[in-house]
Image: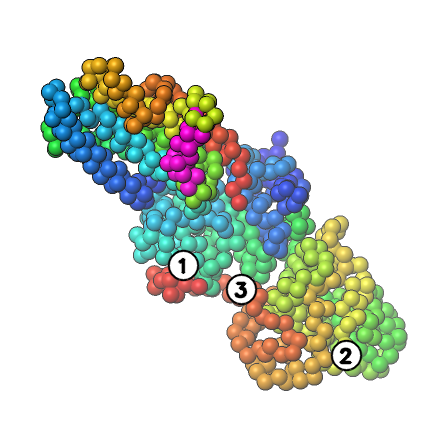
Amino acid sequence: MNRLLLSEVYKLSTTKVWWALLIPVAVIAFVLGLAGAAIAGLSTVVEDAGLTPALALTMPISMEQTTVFAAVVGLIGGAGEFRHRTITTTYLTGVSRGSVLAAKAIVHAGLGLVYGVVTAVFCAAGALLNSGTDSFPSTTDTLAVAAAGVVGVMAWCVLGVGIGVLITNQIAVLIVVLVYLLFVEGLIGLLVGTVLGADELPRYLPGAGSTALQTAHGITVFANAFGDEAFGVHDVVEGLVGSSGQLSWWGGGLLIAAYTAAFLAAGWYVGGRRDIT
Amino acid sequence: MVQVYEGTIEVTGLTKHFGAVAAVQDLSFTVEPGSVTGFLGPNGAGKTTTLRMILGLVRPTDGTATIGGRAFEALGNPGRVVGAVLEAQQFHPGRGARDHLRCYAAAMGVPTGRVDQVVALVGLTSAAGRSTRGYSLGMRQRLALATALLGDPQVLVLDEPANGLDPEGIAWLRNFLRTFARSGRTVLVSSHLLAEVEQTVDQVVIVSRGECVYQGHLDDLRAGQRRRVLIDAGDPGALVTALQDAGFGAIDLTPDGRLSVADAERQQVGDIALASGIAVYGIAEERTDLEQVFLQLTNAQFAAGPPGYGQGYGPAYGPPYGYGPTYGPGYGPPPGYGPGYQPGYGPAPLGLPAGHPTSTGYPANPGYPANPPYPTNPAYPTTPGYPANPPYPANPPYPASPAYPTTPGYPADPGRPTGPGYPPTQNRPPVQEPPSPYARPVTPQDREPGHGP
């Protein structure tokens, strides 16, 4: 297994995708952190309470953006070998197809960790650059928000591998997953949730799961800074940053973990029986 | 308990259906270490599917394939047991050869130093740092071979490895495979051309339509070649009597009125005719060559007579399948001539091992009847440019098939006219080079894309 892990690390490190997509991730996180802190500075005009903990919102938002990139890297990691037909050699040199998939999943979890940590660092750096630590929530909350965000990014990177190995057509899988994440899931929320009235359903979709995991705690921290639940700040922010009526952070975490496990299992089952011709 | 050697490939009742298509049907054969085994059959015979089933890439519908007694999945670290060069095997375009090999060296747990060894072995050192995007087909084949050798495997499986290699590369590969096998390891190499591997392999497994039609020593197949003498005599009846008196039993009358004497030599028959005072208007000796035997074994796949075969092989081999000398302009219209071979030559199985499933007499040569206008072209032998191919008209000893690949003039053949009715030559199979006595690893300049095939 160690051999296959090392092999997958080499495979990643000898291609450009992983760092090419890490650049926009870092830039977006930095800009969001910077802008969030700047907007937070404006609120001092209205409030006497000092700066609001804007990082509690910009960090989760950055993580949501990074999640899309991590999903793309994961999908390429899973389907890329089929696209370039290197999967033949990979299966010829791997102990088993299952162990190859496991190695890919583990290495991409690690890559997701890198993406998440880079996001957290650059977002915090942006905020720090603008207004010092004034827009930071407490250290514990900052770390909690960052950790939840990183776990969501990791989950989607691994989920991408599972979907990629399951479907194998890299172009198709990228288009489908990106369109789904960026448009379809929101549309389903609108259609099913609002029009059909089944507003319980959208929160159990995979995108909503990771969003809940990544944003729930930050939204609570941010809303609590206003001190008064009567304003309904929490619900308003939740509608803007996360999704209305979303699960708690741990509920979302369990949900996205379940999706990841399900797609990995499907990739393992289907991929293990597939004829490589 | 039969002892199973480490490198023995054993295929038992292997069957694969792709939907309604049966790609491989109940295929069984054994490949032993210490020799190069050719896995032969026309395109679409199921060779690639079989190799991929042996390598665990395709799941058999039925049957088993084992390497050293174990299924591929049970090999543990398969790259250290079996290396494979497959047709569709490719590389990430952004990775260089060295990076590509490092990825798989890691997967097999092979030290990184081995990467440079195999790169040097296949002669890719100067290109190892470049991304494979710019590699020629020949370089890709070399890299695929390097990948296969990375784990220093006991077994080597190659699917049409000569594709894309230049003649020098092919000669090198032949030499390499023989040396590899001689060290007690197993080599299974597939090809759709017997001539391509004839000088490399010791054993052959011939498949047709997903079924095994022959397995055994190439020498046995070669020994099975039969010859016959075709003689156009003034008094066939008297000659038959004379020949029978001389002990020649298998005498037949061909539809064009000639006598066919099996297992005879020209001189013998000529002497008998002279001694009997019978006029002889023409005499020719024929011998089936290996390629013919191969085609005969496999042509059940193309019962209707594939145009591709006739066109592709005929011209490239000179007289189609060695019938040339008997086929000249003076011989009249051949329609009816071809079909007559089958009954005329009798059901003798061409000396193939007894009980051979598809040995049903003389080959119903698929390409042969497809050439009707050919002999009716009186200008043919004198067509300008044609004489540039000296062996052709004066080619009575063509049946001496061992010399076939080295027939002078055969590889060049530039002046061959596309005369009326002459089959086009674009499907000509790759020209075979004799094994180079100087087989050497190819030098770097040979490997620049411009020099590649």
Location of residue A33 with respect to A15 vertically, above or below: above
From mark 1 to mark 2, how far is it between C-alphas?
49 Å
Q: Position of residue B360 (x, y in %)?
A: 76, 56
Instruction: Give me the chain letter of mark 3.
Output: B
Residue A225 visible to an observer of this rendering: yes
Q: Position of residue B407 (x, y in %)?
A: 57, 72
SS at circle 2 = loop
On whether residue A148 falls in the magenta region, the answer is: no
Location of residue B130 with respect to A133 vertically, above or below: below
B148 sits left or right of A224 in the view:
right
Q: Position of residue B142 (x, y in %)?
A: 42, 54
Q: Which mark is residue B332?
A: 2
Query: Which residue was labeled with disc 1?
Result: B136
Which image quarter: residue A180? Answer: top left
The residue under the point 46% across, 56% down is B173
Amino acid of disc 1: Ser
First along the sequence among labels 2 and 3: 2
The residue under the point 71% across, 76% down is B373
Which image quarter: residue A106? Answer: top left
B224 sits left or right of A109 in the view:
right
Amino acid of disc 2: Gly
Q: Mainly helix, strand or loop, the magenta region?
A: helix
Q: Which mark is residue B452?
A: none
Using the image as rendered, state which of residue A228 and residue B392 is in the foreground: A228
On whether residue A189 falls in the magenta region, the answer is: yes
Instruction: Give me the chain letter of mark 2.
Output: B
Instruction: Give me the chain letter of mark 1.
Output: B
Query: Which residue was labeled with disc 3?
Result: B430
